Image: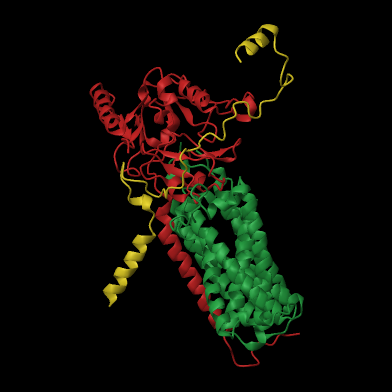
Chain colours: A red, B green, C yellow
Amino acid sequence: MAEPMGFFTDTTVCIGCKACEVACKQWNQLPSPEGGANTMSGDSYDNTRKLDGINWRHVKFVEQFSEDRVGGRWLLMSDVCKHCVRAGCLEVCPTNAIIRTEFDTVVIQSDVCNGCGACVAGCPFGVIDINPVSKTAQKCTLCYDRLQAGMEPACSKACPTDSIQFGPVRELRERGAKRVSQLNDGGESRAYLYGADEKMLGGLNSFFLLVDKPEVYGLPPDPKLPSRNLVPASMFSALGALLVALIGVFSFRERRSGEGEDRP
Amino acid sequence: MSEIASSTWFTTAPHWGWLIVFYYLFGGLAAGSYFIAALIDLIGRREDRPIARMGYFVAIPCLMVSGVLLLVDLYRPDRFWHLFLQSNTMRPIFQYWAPMSIGSWGIIVFSLFALLSFLAALAESRHLSWGWAGHLRPPSIVGRVIAVLGILMAMYVAGYAGVLLAVTNRPLWSDTPLLGMLLGVSAMSISASLLLLIARWRGLKFPGVRSLDRFDSWVIGLTLLVLVAVIVSLGSVARVWLSLWGALLLVAVLVGMIVPLFMRWRSARSAQTSALAAVMVLIGGFILRTVIVFTQQGIQP
Amino acid sequence: MRSVCLASVAIVLAACTSPESTRTRGGGPGADIGNRGSEVMMHEGSKPFHGTPVKQPAQPPPLDSASQADRLSR
């Protein structure tokens, strides 16, 4: 087994060029939405809007400006599948289409998936959706095919500012910690790593350096596994069944005659 | 962005829409009808056996509709068998931690029991000349075993659907562990109403018809309690219902629970009132399922 | 007796949790039960011009020089 590999995305150096989106689409030969029709969001330079079956990289534009547009800043973040150490999509997949590779990444096998949608609802980050060509669930593969050939993923290769860095997770975490202390020393005290340690789903193999609350970037502050509800929900369902069975026994058991007559 | 009620706000809605609403309706009716039928068979009066037979007759068509709905809801229906066999290794697949996996097997096993009881009911009503099939229903030993196991599977099928919703990361669904209980209990009440309606329509006068009425009223009361518990357990997430969906939920509660209860309480022995109340419970059950499935769809990152 | 019951309930509950919920980084397959062939297929959805309207005939006649290049390259 190879070492766990991942991405470290330093959002403070992202310039929003979307080279990663383009490189991802090119390598994976993904189609445009609506057959290439010109679809503008109308309120942002972000026209991709979300990760889904045909967008496996998405540069988020967070435009924090005051009403009079005098003060403000751009927060740019290239979002991607987090390749969670404890993956919500993988555990709810009923066909085992979603597998864990030797690089500790999470990959959907497009020839196994039957498009049931469980992983779409199970992903804590809203990364997965149905690809309209294959009609199966798809997402970032962390370029599993390139990794097997000893190459780095297309997006990190294309990133001109090294906002996206690829490598062994152990190494990336050290690099991330160093960058946070560098920013802190330089006066940017808000910088922190999102998902680098084990607290979040056992660790995210693609983690981020952020300078605001996660929800500002559209990331959940406290992502959890879907299976957290399995035992309590089953217990309550069983309790409900038990109560109904009791009512049933009292309603249908044999009674004295003459009690069940209808009024005409 | 205003403050976020839950981390579930950042997830994507699966494409589960009307097909799933109707599946929850027909799957619930199949499970509930079987449950009531087998319970009457096991502990009820002998003269109520025709009602039980009716339940078995209802369960099979409802199950067939459910199966078709689930199949069509897959984006790749041609690969439905991947739920039962690993497509690469050809070994059976059963993941006890994934509700979609255990649910698929559960429906198959329940269908088997429902089919056996259906055959027995056919044999008893002389639509089928296989004499042995009659023994697949109580009071024979084999029939008792089938009914008990079938009841367990019916309760399982009625309840797993809501557990499936809980084992996701969507708002509302995964913010309470009680939806399985709500859908399961409600399945029993809509099934009792359906059987009651058929019985009233056919003019049946068995004492069991009154029992169905009483059973339904108690279960509706229980459904109301569970719904209150759902809203309490949601906490601040309950604000998703400060919307049209919430208004629709109110309609479901009034039409499907409070008004029928009131009607039955006011004129307990009138056949017409009882039939009308049953229709309202069915409509309310449908609206309740619509609200549960669709409320989360508008919430996207 | 009560402790035995409690312990068995606890064991059943523990057995019901997903293998994914206790996984650590690099710590084995988790909930992946190994349904894969020798080659992992990922790109069934690869069709760059999916849904793009065709405004010219799908296959224009190749230019002379291009057809020669095509012939020579075979």
Residue situated in front as seen by the camera: A243 or C39: C39
Farthest residue, direction top: C65
Give percent across and percent down for residue B188: 58, 70
Looking at the figure, which quarter contains the C terminus of chain A? Answer: bottom right
Q: Left or right? Give the position of A175 relative to B153.
A: left
Residue A33 to residue B278: above or below: above
- Location of residue A136 (image quadrant): top right
Residue B258 visible somewhere in the drawing: no
Quarter occupied by residue B297? top right
| Placement of A143 over or under C7, stated as above or below | above
| Residue A184 lies in quadrant | top left
Give x and y (percent) for residue B167: 46, 53
Camera-nearest residue between A234 and A4? A4
The residue furthest bottom is: A257
Residue B295 pos. (x, y %): 57, 50
> Quick check: B133 left or right of A249?
right
User: Residue at left 59%, top 86%?
Assistant: B139
**Residue A175, placed above or below residue A195:** above
Instruction: State the image coordinates of residue B66 (x, y, percent, origin top left).
Output: 64, 59
> Is any part of residue A182 visible from this angle?
yes
Question: Which residue is located at x 38 percent, y 18 percent?
Answer: A161
* Picture quarter with the N terminus of chain A: top left
| In this rendering, position of residue B284 left or right of residue A11 | right
| Residue at the image point whose x is 56% and y is 69% from the top | B154
Look at the picture and state if A155 lies above or below A113.
above
